[in-house]
């Protein structure tokens, strides 16, 4: 087994996991606090990437572009919440699913109209567009490393916000007992709007960081949305901690599994069979993990207290 | 002569986050009696009902019904051996008609429902017993009305009708008069007086007039414990009860 | 017994659909027969999904997966018959049984796990399972992976019916629709249907009166999956092609849209919904209006998305609420 490759794949796993966490954090809060299914979360991720590509083009700097993107997606999230989603909180999940599905169609088509059907490229500045040797002999792309660092920083920041601030207290209270925040006399609408905007900004951040390494294209939010849903379901809806652990887990399993499954299968199966089965099995793995978790704990690994439904 | 105990509750415990909702509770319900449970808000009355029906699991203690330990019997299973409940907060099939509500309960006790072809809504095996029950509860005129358009009082009566349709040995009535007007309550008390002759009943109720006029025996629940059990007269004259409960209200 | 005006409209629609191949012959444009055949297949799948969503309250977001299984059975059968000369795999009856059984078994496994969860969890886990099947199909190189499989010969029904004949295929689809409609009618009105509807209406009460909803729900889940698998069998024969795209989660979303557009409260709702969905697609994408050099029709989803939101918000019962005798409320 190639240990340097394993190390690199583990880093890649963390990088994917942290991206997933940024998406999952916002989505799980919206689920947990507002009991709202938002399929259009992936669209906000896509908008983050497109905004960043545009702003980077305007300013000529990726960092400036990224800095402009965050408030833009935050604002977009708030607009979406106020215009379309606000009226849906009281509706059942089916209505929410359908309306946000409508939003996805809208965003995809609007993106095609504005930016055209061909994907965009986000150019990286030189200092991010190189490799660093964290361990001698194992060069690793600086940008991917930056994603990992930013991901951990945001995770820490979120942890502080949720556990130490008044907003965090309300968020936690909301996830476990929705009626209670109402009873506290808090302006619930404002809280919801803020949380939604925050979730949108995080999704946008994930999008703008994924843009340079994946590709900025229409529908890029949909594949990752499903992964994010798996993360949330495994972690327990409404739980930031659960989202973090599940995101890292999924990131690692998916990345490391994909590169090493053929070798592992080779040990137990005839090599011809192993080579055919490996791609199918490795793309099934995270879903099998989800099935396993839910078969044992239908509420996910870390269900917030009081969510007995 | 003593009548046998239909329901025996022994040392039952339920904790919520360290709070004892049911605290080492023991009581018995004799065959044929109407046993009322009273107690201030938060005494754990509804928790007890949920433990009896199996909706929530007990942390300790046991429940014996008709000689059978209920520990391993599921909530639907308990319905099949003769435990029926009404809900404190009306819980009906709101988009079904009154008759369909009762028929569904009859259906639950007429063998399995893996029958995919034959029309059910005119099946006299279901409608006949259902209509008889509706007659008993004075709802036969409303049989074809959609439940959501019934008055609150009528819905409370239907709650009991649905429970009766499961042919119970023991009726658990959780505040059947909750939210009722004076007249509606009086009508319901008359129905209960009549039901009392045919069923063993465990009644939870806030309406003291109703409890003292209906009950054969009364248990007083405070903080998840039964502090006294006796006839209405005994309860009225019990010092502990006066202090702990009636005293506060008088 | 007199017919209500709603029944007259439903009957008129069925008569129109029966006459359609001859009408298009007369007009001389058979494009619409193919389009309507596609609509009817989707209507069959939507009808089966409506048993879960409309009657049972189980919002399954992965129903297209079962269509995919049925379609791949036909595709794989044709593939091996063509490549390896295994003739029995082209036998339409073998394919039919395999499509129905295969989708039923997968539905049993997925349902057994998914139905342990509630609400949002259920929506997401069914969606995730269908994506798992989607990625599995994408991963299998032998059967074309991303590009899918072309089907060089349609199911061989041993002379009973010739599926290469477009009219025969259309009428097989049409009769299948009638059968599924009647099946649903009986199912919903049966003892079993009563339990399914009751479990949607009030699960706590169901348990209190002695029902265990799980096994009934699982049965409904399997029935719906099997019917969708059958729809897939028809779909593959109509398209002469199958690819992972039929199982994509957005295809499952389309099925839910059809149910929503048609109205969940009624038996015919999914049929109207499927018609409305594909007609809207045709209509919106052929809007001739041009704004600033861009043809509006080319960006039809820009209109369809918000329209969907408006339907959810203001016309909850879809087409159904515009037909005579519509039930008020939910």
Image (tube, rainbow, N blue to C red):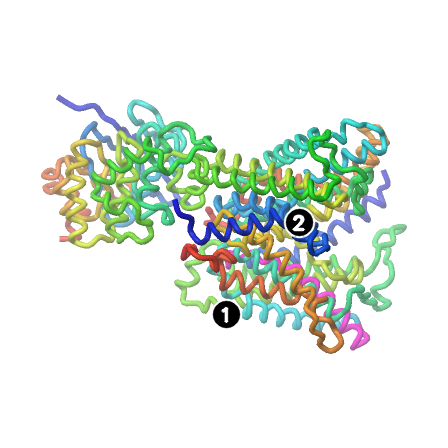
Left of B199 or right of it: where is C265? right
- Give the x, y percent position of residue C217: 50, 38
Please say whether residue A41 is one of the residues in the magenta stretch: yes
Any part of residue A64 in sight = no
Residue topped by disc 1:
A190
Please say whether residue A89 is one of the residues in the magenta stretch: no
Choose top left, top right, bottom left or bottom right for residue A51.
bottom right
* In this view, A190 is above or below B104: below
The Cα atoms of the two marked residues, 2 and 1, are separated by: 60 Å
* In this view, A152 is above or below B92: below
Segment tinted magenta in the rendering: A34-61
* In this view, A48 is above or below C37: below
Residue located 14% across and 42% down the image: B190
As helix, strand or loop, the secondary structure at mark 1 comes to helix
- Give the x, y percent position of residue A65: 75, 72
Residue located 55% across and 67% down the image: A84
Any part of residue B151 in sight = yes
The answer to whether tags 2 and 1 share a subunit is: no
Q: Nearer the viewer, mark 2 or mark 1?
A: 2
Q: Nearer the viewer, residue C61 or A76?
A: C61
Q: Residues within 10 Å of mark 1 (few under 14, many from 20)?
A: few
- Give the x, y percent position of residue A48: 70, 66
Choose top left, top right, bottom left or bottom right for residue C77.
top right
Q: Which mark is residue A23?
A: none
Residue topped by disc 2:
C22
Q: Residues within 10 Å of mark 2 (few under 14, many from 20)?
A: some
Q: Nearer the viewer, residue B128 or C275?
A: C275
- Give the x, y percent position of residue C216: 48, 35
Disc 1: host chain? A
As helix, strand or loop, the secondary structure at mark 2 comes to helix
């Amino acid at each position: 087994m190639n240990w340097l490759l394993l190390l690199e794949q583990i880093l890649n796993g963390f990088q994917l996991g942290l991206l997933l966490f940024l998406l999952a954090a916002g989505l799980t809060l919206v689920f947990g606090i507002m009991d709202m299914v938002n399929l259009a979360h992936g669209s906000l991720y896509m908008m983050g990437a497109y905004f960043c590509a545009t702003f980077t083009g305007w300013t000529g700097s990726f960092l400036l572009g990224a800095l402009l993107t965050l408030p833009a997606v935050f604002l977009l999230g708030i607009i979406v919440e106020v215009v379309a989603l606000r009226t849906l909180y009281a509706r059942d999940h089916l209505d929410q699913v359908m309306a946000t599905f409508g939003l996805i169609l809208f965003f995809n088509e609007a993106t095609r109209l504005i930016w055209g059907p061909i994907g965009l490229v986000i150019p990286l500045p030189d200092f991010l567009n190189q490799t660093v040797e964290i361990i001698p002999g194992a060069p690793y792309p600086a940008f991917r490393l930056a994603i990992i660092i930013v991901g951990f920083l945001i995770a820490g920041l979120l942890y502080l916000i949720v556990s130490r601030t008044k907003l965090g207290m309300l968020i936690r209270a909301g996830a476990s007992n929705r009626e209670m925040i109402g009873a506290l006399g808090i302006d619930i609408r404002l809280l919801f709007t803020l949380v939604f905007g925050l979730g949108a900004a995080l999704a946008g951040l994930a999008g703008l960081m994924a843009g340079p390494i994946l590709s900025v294209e229409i529908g890029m939010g949909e594949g990752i949305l499903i992964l994010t849903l798996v993360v949330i379901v495994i972690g327990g809806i409404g739980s930031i901690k659960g989202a973090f652990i599940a995101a890292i887990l999924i990131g690692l399993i998916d990345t490391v599994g994909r590169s090493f499954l053929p070798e592992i299968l080779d040990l137990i199966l005839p090599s011809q069979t192993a080579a055919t089965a490996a791609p199918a099995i490795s793309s099934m793995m995270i879903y099998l993990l989800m099935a396993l978790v839910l078969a044992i704990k239908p509420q996910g690994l870390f269900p917030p207290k009081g969510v007995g439904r | 002569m003593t009548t046998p105990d239909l329901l025996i509750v022994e040392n039952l415990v339920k904790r919520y986050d360290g709070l004892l909702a049911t605290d080492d509770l023991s009581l018995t319900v004799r065959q044929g009696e109407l046993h009322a449970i009273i107690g201030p808000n938060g005494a754990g009355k509804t928790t007890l009902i949920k433990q009896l029906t199996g909706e929530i699991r007990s942390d300790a203690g046991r429940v014996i019904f008709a000689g059978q330990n209920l520990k391993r019997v599921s909530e639907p299973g308990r319905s099949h051996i003769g435990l029926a409940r009404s809900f404190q907060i009306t819980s009906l099939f709101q988009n079904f008609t009154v008759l369909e509500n009762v028929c569904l309960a009859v259906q639950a006790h007429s063998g399995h429902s893996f029958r995919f072809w034959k029309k059910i809504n005119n099946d006299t095996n279901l409608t006949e017993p259902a209509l008889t029950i509706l007659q008993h509860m004075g709802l036969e005129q409303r049989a074809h009305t959609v439940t959501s358009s019934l008055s609150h009082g009528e819905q409370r009566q239907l709650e009991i009708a649905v429970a009766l349709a499961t042919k119970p040995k023991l009726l658990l009535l959780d505040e059947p008069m909750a939210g009722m007007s004076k007249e509606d309550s009086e009508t319901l008390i008359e129905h209960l007086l009549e039901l009392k002759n045919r069923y063993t009943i465990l009644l939870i109720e806030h309406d003291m007039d109703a409890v003292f006029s209906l009950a054969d025996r009364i248990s007083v629940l405070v903080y998840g414990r039964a502090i006294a059990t006796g006839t209405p007269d005994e309860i009225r004259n019990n010092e502990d009860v006066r202090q702990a409960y009636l005293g506060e209200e008088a | 017994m007199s017919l209500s005006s709603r029944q007259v409209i439903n009957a008129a629609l069925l008569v129109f659909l029966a006459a359609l191949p001859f009408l298009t012959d007369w007009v001389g444009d058979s494009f619409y027969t193919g389009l309507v055949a596609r609509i009817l297949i989707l209507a069959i799948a939507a009808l089966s999904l409506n048993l879960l969503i409309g009657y049972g309250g189980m919002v399954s977001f992965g129903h297209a997966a079962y269509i995919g299984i049925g379609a791949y059975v036909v595709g794989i059968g044709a593939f091996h018959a063509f490549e390896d000369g295994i003739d029995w795999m082209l036998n339409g009856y073998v394919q039919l049984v395999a499509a129905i059984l295969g989708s039923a078994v997968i539905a049993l496994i997925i349902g057994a796990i998914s139905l342990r969860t509630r609400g949002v969890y259920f929506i997401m886990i069914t969606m995730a399972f269908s994506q798992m099947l989607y990625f599995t199909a994408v991963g299998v190189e032998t059967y074309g992976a991303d590009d899918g499989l072309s089907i060089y010969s349609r199911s061989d029904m041993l002379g009973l019916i010739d599926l290469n004949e477009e009219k025969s295929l259309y009428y097989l689809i049409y009769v299948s629709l009638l059968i599924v409609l009647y099946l649903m009618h009986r199912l919903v009105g049966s003892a079993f249907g009563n339990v399914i509807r009751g479990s949607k209406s009030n699960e706590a009460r169901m348990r209190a009166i002695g029902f265990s909803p799980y096994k009934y729900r699982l049965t409904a889940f399997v029935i719906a999956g099997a019917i969708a698998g059958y729809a897939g069998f028809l779909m593959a024969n109509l398209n002469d092609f199958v690819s992972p795209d039929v199982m994509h989660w957005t295809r499952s979303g389309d099925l839910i849209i059809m149910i929503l557009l048609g109205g969940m409260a009624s038996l015919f709702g999914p049929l109207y919904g499927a018609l409305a969905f594909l007609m809207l697609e045709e209509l919106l994408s052929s809007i001739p209006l041009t704004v600033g050099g861009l043809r509006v029709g080319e960006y039809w989803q820009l209109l369809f998305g918000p329209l969907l939101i408006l339907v959810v918000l203001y016309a909850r019962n879809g087409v159904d609420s515009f037909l005579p005798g519509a039930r008020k409320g939910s």
